[in-house]
Amino acid sequence: MQNNNQNIKSEVRKTKEAILNQNAKVIWFTGLSGAGKTTISVLLEQKLLKQGFICNVIDGDIIRHKLNKDLGFSENDRLENIRRIAEISKMFLETGVITINAFVSPTEKIRNVAKEIIGENDFLEIFINSSIEVCENRDVKGLYKKAREGKISDFTGITSPYENPKNPFLEVRTDILSIEQSVEIIIKNILPLIKKD
Amino acid sequence: MQNNNQNIKSEVRKTKEAILNQNAKVIWFTGLSGAGKTTISVLLEQKLLKQGFICNVIDGDIIRHKLNKDLGFSENDRLENIRRIAEISKMFLETGVITINAFVSPTEKIRNVAKEIIGENDFLEIFINSSIEVCENRDVKGLYKKAREGKISDFTGITSPYENPKNPFLEVRTDILSIEQSVEIIIKNILPLIKKD
């Protein structure tokens, strides 16, 4: 659990957080494709917005069609993908905005790149954990089928590894809980950190 | 003058702008190195912050050391640099945040890339205009000297062209006005656009 909130913050960031009446954090969802990261991100943003919190969802699928459309799925490109996202998240942090990031981010190495750029105290790693069987059964985007057929190389969980986070801020079992339940648990855990005293 | 404010905005953006009590815009400073873009950006952000506006400065020099450290100064790399910045600015727009962008952005083509991604109604092009002689005389970073000595290739104003904006939202003559005066004129012109009715 990362409850240490003694960040070294810039004065400008502090002023913006005061106006926004919130503490900026990066909520980083990691997990297999189909585990529910995007769905949870969107619902979480909606619920936080209703409470007056200003967030920004940065979603892996969208980012790859826009900002990072020049990148593929090799290990180097995955690292560059995450490096850029982390730099952008830091820009949002400096503006006082909470970012909700939904990225498979399959390895410890990749997540550490993000954590180092963002800063440990602002990086809330949440493991959206669903078994590969459940994810593959859902297969909303038909990606698992394509990966099994060899039409996608380097597909996490099938042809490239997913390393479970060792010490996440929070783990949410989306193969047991509903999306609503999952979001409630997340809100309960992050509220003490993003809420101003 | 871009006074048409009938953007097609997402519902989420509208909600965020309502909470922030501001209309998000991208304030895009273009001009020669040494014209005062960065200095004006920082002061403008400070003054707007005092009035409760949430802004984010995206500065060319800083971006090139962090997010876009993989890019050089060839025409393609300059375009990619601006493309990414424009995509990021759009993310801030969607979050309801005003961005203040300080980029030489020397050609019509480059600025059009930004304008197309950001959307014409949200893109406020401000020409920070100082004569090349004044900029070269100041030469705060010693870059003009290096460019004259041939140590920097593709240096705008010396070895690569700067095309004056044809129809900017605003032009500010920083070789005539002080920084304070420049910022006052900018605020006077953008306030009607960023202020909620």
Image: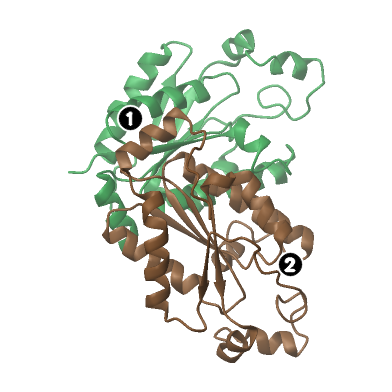
Chain colours: A brown, B green
What chain does badge 1 belong to? B
- Is residue B10 visible in the rendered image? The answer is no
Q: Is residue B87 left or right of residue B153?
A: left
Q: Is residue B99 left or right of residue A121?
A: left
| Residue A70 on image: x %, y % | 69, 59
| Residue A153 on image: x %, y % | 77, 77
Which picture quadrant has residue B132?
A: top right
| Residue A33 on image: x %, y % | 60, 76
Q: Residue at x 41, y 11 (%)?
A: B178
Q: Is residue B188 above or below residue A127?
A: above
Q: Residue at x 37, y 63 (%)?
A: A188
The quarter in which the C terminus of chain A is drawn is top left
Q: Is residue B143 above or below residue B196?
A: above
Describe the element under mark 1 as helix, strand or loop.
helix
Q: Which residue is mark 1?
A: B48
Amino acid found under the numbered disc labelled 1? Leu
Amino acid found under the numbered disc labelled 2? Phe
Q: Nearer the viewer, residue A154 or A179?
A: A179
Disc on res. A17: none
Are discs 1 and 2 located on one and the same chain?
no
Q: Nearer the viewer, residue B27 or B53?
A: B53
**Label 1 to label 2: alpha-carbon separation:** 41 Å
Describe the element under mark 2 as helix, strand or loop.
loop
Q: Which residue is mark 2?
A: A73
| Residue A131 on image: x %, y % | 61, 83
Q: Residue at x 52, y 17 (%)?
A: B130
Which picture quadrant has residue A41?
A: bottom left
Q: Is residue A43 above or below residue A5?
A: below
Q: Residue at x 29, y 50 (%)?
A: B17
- Is residue B157 visible in the rendered image? The answer is yes
